[in-house]
Image (tube, grey):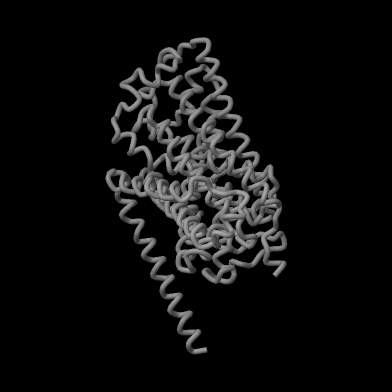
């Protein structure tokens, strides 16, 4: 029905910036400090390895999305290739991990605002949620505009960091931590100061840093020209990884020896402070604030669209498929926002543990989603070779690369089981999947009994 169709109001400009916004977030601005403490300079290789893996996941997703015009997102792909049970589990899992990520980000907004105003952190958190809800209820174009400007702030900040870092390298600038030099990458106990174990333990936070890249797939149904915009956005991912992650981290570690960085603070704040910019802390605090708001905005968009698709496929309450006059799934958006606001209270009750638990569970759930995309692509290539043959956006190096990336994801999960900090969340997460598979099985049994009785 026409009134039940999502409006294709995202332009190429919006899709490109959604793609950038998806690859720059809290994981880089905040999580990189902790990751650097674990891995030292070898963190550069961790970001590079996971970034390459995510690129191949996105190429597989891109080929699948463009193989059939009716695909709304990758939950539809899972439905087509793995059946309704897998689609049910994947859709609700994606909703769940974005809800958790949005919870952490909205609480972070409250914390960052306290830098300027000493008010209870729940007040700016709720205000932020209400503002984002208002914009998202109006039109999808407003979501695109918000992400455009949020992402632009991130890009300008990292670009400024890299330019300043290169200038300091060229002139041989000296800070309180010593000279700015490439030798800082290996002069302090080498590239792997904490050994291979420290390098491997950093992968959980690195994976979390890349969550959201697949928003290209979620926004596909609202892209005005998916055949052009989606390939363009995906093909630029490698350059973004090299520039925004690898480039920024190299500059950070040249200006600051890794031993000078604190896991509890943003290395970006530290770097701007060292080079003598007096308003550095306030500027970076603003950037991190907009980054958290951007992640929360992406979470609200993503979760509402996932609920819409689940409802559209009969896997969620029928009310979630209803669109408002602006062609936005208003009911789904309201419910997701309410759940996020309830999670804000939970995060406030356990502020010290919440971020670590949320990021670990979020990373595990995203690994599930990315794994499903790769498995669907393997089945697509095997069962529908005619579609693969005529594809104008073929995923490279398949099926070998699919198996290689799936093996990397399995290794990361084993590492999470090994690490004390991530082990509890990893052991708890299967309960979510058991619940979903049980619900999916019960739904199938009820459907069969209804069909038999009819």
Q: Locate residue 278: give its quadrant.
A: top right
Q: Position of residue 347 (x, y in %)?
A: 42, 49
Comparing 153 with 155, the one in front is 155
Q: Does residue 402 lie above or below 448 as drawn?
A: above
x 49%, y 45%: residue: 397
x 40%, y 32%: residue: 43
Q: Farthest residue in the bottom direction? A: 453
x 43%, y 43%: residue: 207
Q: Position of residue 312 (x, y in %)?
A: 59, 68
Q: Does residue 210 lie above or below 276 as drawn?
A: below
Q: Locate residue 442: give its quadrant.
A: bottom left
Q: How many marks?
A: 0
Comparing 249 with 129, the one in front is 249
Name the image quarter holding the N terminus.
bottom right
Q: Does residue 386 lie above or below 239 as drawn?
A: below
Image side of residue 380 versus residue 265, left or right: right
Q: Does residue 198 lie above or below 174 as drawn?
A: below
Q: Is residue 125 visible?
A: no
Q: Position of residue 246 (x, y in %)?
A: 48, 30
Q: Is residue 163 visible?
A: yes
Q: Where is residue 178 in the image (x, y as percent from the top left)?
A: 41, 13
């Amino acid at each position: 029905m026409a009134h039940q169709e999502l409006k294709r109001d995202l332009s190429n400009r919006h899709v490109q910036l959604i793609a950038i916004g998806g690859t720059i977030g809290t994981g880089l601005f905040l999580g990189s400090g902790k990751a650097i403490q674990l891995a030292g300079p070898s963190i550069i290789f961790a970001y590079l390895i996971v970034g390459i893996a995510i690129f191949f996941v996105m190429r597989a997703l891109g080929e699948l999305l463009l193989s059939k015009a009716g695909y709304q997102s990758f939950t539809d792909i899972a439905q087509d290739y793995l059946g309704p049970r897998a689609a049910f589990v994947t859709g609700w899992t994606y909703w769940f991990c974005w809800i958790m990520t949005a919870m952490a980000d909205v609480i972070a907004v409250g914390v960052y605002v306290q830098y300027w105003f000493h008010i209870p952190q729940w007040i700016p958190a709720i205000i932020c949620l209400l503002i984002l809800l208002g914009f998202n209820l109006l039109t999808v174009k407003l979501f695109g505009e918000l992400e455009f400007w949020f992402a632009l702030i991130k890009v300008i900040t990292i670009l400024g960091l890299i330019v300043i870092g290169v200038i300091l390298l060229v002139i041989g600038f000296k800070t309180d931590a010593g000279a700015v030099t490439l030798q800082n990458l290996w002069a302090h106990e080498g590239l792997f100061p904490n050994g291979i174990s420290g390098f491997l333990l950093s992968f959980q936070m690195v994976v979390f840093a890349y969550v959201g890249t697949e928003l290209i797939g979620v926004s596909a149904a609202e892209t005005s020209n998916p055949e052009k915009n989606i390939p363009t956005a995906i093909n630029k991912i490698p350059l973004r990884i090299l520039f925004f992650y690898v480039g920024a981290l190299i500059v950070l570690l040249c200006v600051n020896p890794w031993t000078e960085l604190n896991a509890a603070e943003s290395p970006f704040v530290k770097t701007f402070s060292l080079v003598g910019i007096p308003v550095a802390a306030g500027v970076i605090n603003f950037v991190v604030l907009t980054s958290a708001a951007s992640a929360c905005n992406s979470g609200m968009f993503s979760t509402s669209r996932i609920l819409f698709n689940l409802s559209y496929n009969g896997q969620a309450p029928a009310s979630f498929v209803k669109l408002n006059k602006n062609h936005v799934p208003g009911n789904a958006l309201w419910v997701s926002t309410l759940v996020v606001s309830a999670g804000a209270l939970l995060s406030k009750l356990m502020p010290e543990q919440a971020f670590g638990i949320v990021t670990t569970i979020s990373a595990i759930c995203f690994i599930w989603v990315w794994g499903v995309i790769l498995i669907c692509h393997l089945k697509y290539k095997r069962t529908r070779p005619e579609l693969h043959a005529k594809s104008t956006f073929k995923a490279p190096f398949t099926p070998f690369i699919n198996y290689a990336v799936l093996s990397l994801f399995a290794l990361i999960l084993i590492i999470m089981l090994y690490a004390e900090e991530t082990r509890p969340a990893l052991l708890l997460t299967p309960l979510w999947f058991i619940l979903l598979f049980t619900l999916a099985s019960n739904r199938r049994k009820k459907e069969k009994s209804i069909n038999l009785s009819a």
